[in-house]
């Protein structure tokens, strides 16, 4: 029997109906669907169906911290008349939770290392619980405490669903903990799984360098997972277009960059900054490229006045040239601070622990999407890469994404790119990289080629072991 789509005012896409159909009647199932294909709505649709058939009482969602409020928003959008409670680590999170369902409870993965784990377990002991693990790659590590706690929790659940657009970030072994969470049969113990489906290499053959027995793994997963890509299911989405804005560093930046490259040392604002490891030098070189550097005491040292920063000037010029809204992604908090100083009316995404009292990521998202006067969203990549739909309105569409800086993670880049590239988008999306130095050029090139970013930039400088006298 095909499941019913319970939201008449929100017609489903074909891929959502297929996702529901394949999971129907199963305890554990994985929706490995590309970002933008509507996984959240699929969870809510199945939850409503299970409520109607008296199979569950509550929905518990475990999600990355920045995505928790999305579940409340989507529940309202879909017209589901049940309360949504969001864990904030305080007693207020659970004070008003009723003793009977239905309701939705949303908690972040980090909370499962403490009181959040105990509370979710107590809920599942009292209620027939539907568990959804949003961005389930957060439990890809078989050794992580949060993974082990999830594996304990699933024994108390009536249904478990995984949601992920990119379930494999490094190698097939990323799948083991996720498949274990839905009690897939035949997955073996972790080391057996790893050596059965991963090609090993590197030092002493300990590094995953590829995959093997792919068809066998696909057959093992088939009863437990629905894999859907945009290329297959969302052919109507607009194109992704890429361009590079070459930025010229100031003389002060070039001097500091060269010194850090060759000597692991630079002078900024009369302060000496010294590093002893390659990875630290590469991070400092990326910071210099953006016009600042973190001092040894954690302070922000500026190589150029933010008001005349070459990269920020290019962001301003780009905003002038485009038609519509623009997302600007950056890696470092100092970069976010400089951008917010230059563009004070922009919406912004930043870690709530850094932002302080009164910050609400849901309000910032709504302002960017719906306020015609809010032309820009400034976001830390690690905060804005997941889940958010950032397309603006039909009259004021977001069709430009500017990468002020990149991270080393290809997965983070791909997720960040998909924030405006979702159903509802009706214009091609332009992605702008802004390299100001060789380290940034190599990062951008490696990401474009979908190759190992770390290896691409490591060859820039010769390794100097810790303790080298400069």
Image (tube, rainbow, N blue to C red):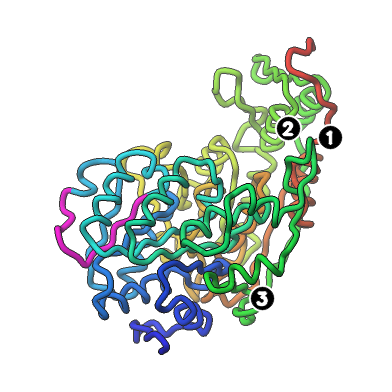
Circles 3 and 1: CB atoms closer than 8 Å: no
Between tags 2 and 3, which lies in front? Answer: 3
Q: Where residue 125 sits in the image (x, y, percent)?
A: 24, 55
Q: Which residue is mark 3?
A: 231
Q: Residue at x 22, y 64 (%)?
A: 83
Placement of 7 over or under 65, stated as above or below = below
Gap between marks 2 and 3 measured at Cα: 35 Å
Between tags 3 and 1, which lies in front? Answer: 3
Q: Where residue 68 sits in the image (x, y, percent)?
A: 38, 55
Looking at this view, is 270 or 430 the one in front? 430
Circles 2 and 3: CB atoms closer than 8 Å: no
Residue 124 relative to residue 306: left or right: left
Placement of 374 over or under 379, stated as above or below = below
Q: Is residue 145 visible?
A: yes
What are the residue bounds of the magenta stretch?
A: 95-107
For the image, the number of numbered tags is: 3
Circles 2 and 1: CB atoms closer than 8 Å: yes
Mark 3 or mark 1, earlier in chain: 3
The quadrant where residue 44 appears = bottom left
The quadrant where residue 237 appears = bottom right
User: Secondary structure beneath disc 1?
Assistant: loop
How many C-alpha atoms fall within 10 Å of the one at disc 2: few (<14), some, or many (≥20)? Answer: many
**Quadrant location, the N terminus:** bottom left
Q: Which residue is mark 1?
A: 460
Residue 338 relative to residue 351: left or right: right
Gap between marks 3 and 1 measured at Cα: 36 Å
Q: Residue at x 73, y 63 (%)?
A: 213
Which residue sits furthest bottom?
1
Q: Which residue is mark 2?
A: 282
Q: Is residue 106 magenta?
A: yes
Q: Residue at x 60, y 18 (%)?
A: 296
Looking at this view, is 447 or 51 the one in front? 51
């Amino acid at each position: 029997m095909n499941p019913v789509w319970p939201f008449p005012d929100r017609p489903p896409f074909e891929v959502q109906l297929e996702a529901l159909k394949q999971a129907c009647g199963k305890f554990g199932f994985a929706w490995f669907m590309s970002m933008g294909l509507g996984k959240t709505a699929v969870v809510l649709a199945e939850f409503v169906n299970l409520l109607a058939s008296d199979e569950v009482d509550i929905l518990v969602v475990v999600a990355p911290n920045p995505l928790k409020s999305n579940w409340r928003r989507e529940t309202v959008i879909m017209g589901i008349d049940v309360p949504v409670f969001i864990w904030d680590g305080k007693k207020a999170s659970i004070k008003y939770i009723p003793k009977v369902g239905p309701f939705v409870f949303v908690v972040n993965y980090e909370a499962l290392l403490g009181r959040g784990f105990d509370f979710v377990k107590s809920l599942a002991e009292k209620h027939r619980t539907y568990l959804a693990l949003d961005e389930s790659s957060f439990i890809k590590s078989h050794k992580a405490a949060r993974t082990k706690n999830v594996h304990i929790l699933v024994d108390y659940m009536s249904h478990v669903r995984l949601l992920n657009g990119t379930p494999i970030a490094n190698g097939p072994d990323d799948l083991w903990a996720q498949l274990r969470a839905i009690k897939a049969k035949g997955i073996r113990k972790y080391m057996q799984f790893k050596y059965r489906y991963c090609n090993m290499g590197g030092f002493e053959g300990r590094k995953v360098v590829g995959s093997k027995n792919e068809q066998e793994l696909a057959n093992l997963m088939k009863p437990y997972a629905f894999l859907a890509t945009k290329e297959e299911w969302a052919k109507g989405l607009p194109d992704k277009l890429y361009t590079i804005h070459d930025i010229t560093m100031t003389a002060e930046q070039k001097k500091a960059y060269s010194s850090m490259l060759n000597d692991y040392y630079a002078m900024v604002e009369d302060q000496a900054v010294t590093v002893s490891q390659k990875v630290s030098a590469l991070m400092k070189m990326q910071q210099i490229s953006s016009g600042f550097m973190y001092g040894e005491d954690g302070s922000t040292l500026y190589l150029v006045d933010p008001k005349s920063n070459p990269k920020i000037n290019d962001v301003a010029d780009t905003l002038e040239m485009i038609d519509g809204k623009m997302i600007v992604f950056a890696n470092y908090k100092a970069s976010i601070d400089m951008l917010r100083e230059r563009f004070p009316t922009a919406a912004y995404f930043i870690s709530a622990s850094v932002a302080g009292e009164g910050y609400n990521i849901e309000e910032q998202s709504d302002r960017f999407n719906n306020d015609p006067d809010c032309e820009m969203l400034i976001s830390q990549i690690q905060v804005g890469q997941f889940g958010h739909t950032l397309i603006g309105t039909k009259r004021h569409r977001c069709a430009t994404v500017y990468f002020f800086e990149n991270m080393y993670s290809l997965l983070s880049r791909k997720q960040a790119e998909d924030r405006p590239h979702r159903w509802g988008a009706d214009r091609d999306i332009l992605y702008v990289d802004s390299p100001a130095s060789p380290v940034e050029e190599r990062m951008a090139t490696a990401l474009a080629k979908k190759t190992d970013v770390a290896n691409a930039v490591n060859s820039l400088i010769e390794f100097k072991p810790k303790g080298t006298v400069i």
